[in-house]
Amino acid sequence: MKNIAGSFCLGAALAVMAGCNPVPPATGISHQAQEKIQATQHWQTIASHLAGKITTSAGNSDQPFYIDSEGRQGVFGRVFADMMTSALLASGARVSEHPDNALAISYDVETVRQPSDRDGEYPWLFTAATATYYLIDGLAGDAAAVMAVGADVARLQPSRTRTELAITTRVTDRGQVLFSETGVYYITDHSASHYMGGNRGGKTFQLTNGSE
């Protein structure tokens, strides 16, 4: 009986939280986990990933690569260009300091500032509801354990931020695009200045909700 009563109460609690609103519910776009850049070493990881894909896209071309000098602006632009050079050489590609007869690599960097009212995640919601069930069932010790484990999991997960970074990397040959990839990452709110200065000036876009 305790299990039945506990299940009923848990279901009732979740139903109350869901609400009874006649307005059609909002649904989220299907998505995958988004990586968060928190160290310069993460730039190296991105450079190595791109170098592998770029050399593959070049196929059997014997042309060297040239990294567009316009991308070497700002802290990220300068360091990332050096990382890309090292990663390309490590993958067996040739890199030239001159654009003549070379495949040109360019990258655009944009930061996006999201509004403060976007939906968030509440990792405590599941643990609280589950712990309530255990409390109703008389297993207070298990309830405390569930809450503790849930709190630890939430604390150890990388936090989402309001600032995101989009890096678009292209390879062109005499005006023809041979490769293009855009990666989107979370970055810490105070690190946006590292990404100022790129092919388009490293603009920051502020998305507002009409009240900010």
Image (cartoon, rainbow, N blue to C red):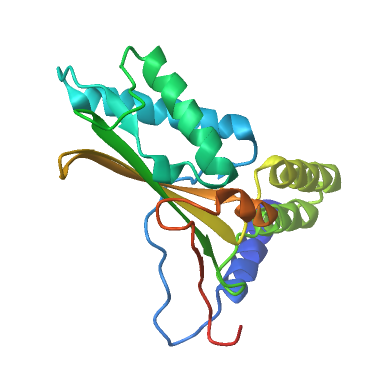
Q: Position of residue 175 (x, y in %)?
A: 16, 45
For the image shown, how many numbered marks are present on the structure?
A: 0
Q: In the rendered image, is residue 200 in sight?
A: yes
Foreground of the two, 137 or 195 = 195
Quadrant in the rendering for residue 88? top left
Q: In the rendered image, is residue 1 in sight?
A: no
* Quadrant of the snapshot with the N terminus: bottom right
* Quadrant of the snapshot with the C terminus: bottom right
Judge from the rendering whether residue 140 lies leftward or rightward of residue 157; answer left or right.
right
Identify the residue shown where x is 27% and y is 35%.
104
Q: Where is residue 11 in the image (x, y as percent from the top left)?
A: 59, 64
Quadrant in the rendering for residue 14? bottom right
Identify the residue shown where x is 67% and y is 59%.
125
Q: Position of residue 41 (x, y in %)?
A: 60, 29
Identify the residue shown where x is 27% and y is 42%.
180
Q: Is residue 31 above or below residue 62?
A: below
Q: Is residue 211 above or below residue 100?
A: below
Q: Position of residue 151 (x, y in %)?
A: 76, 47
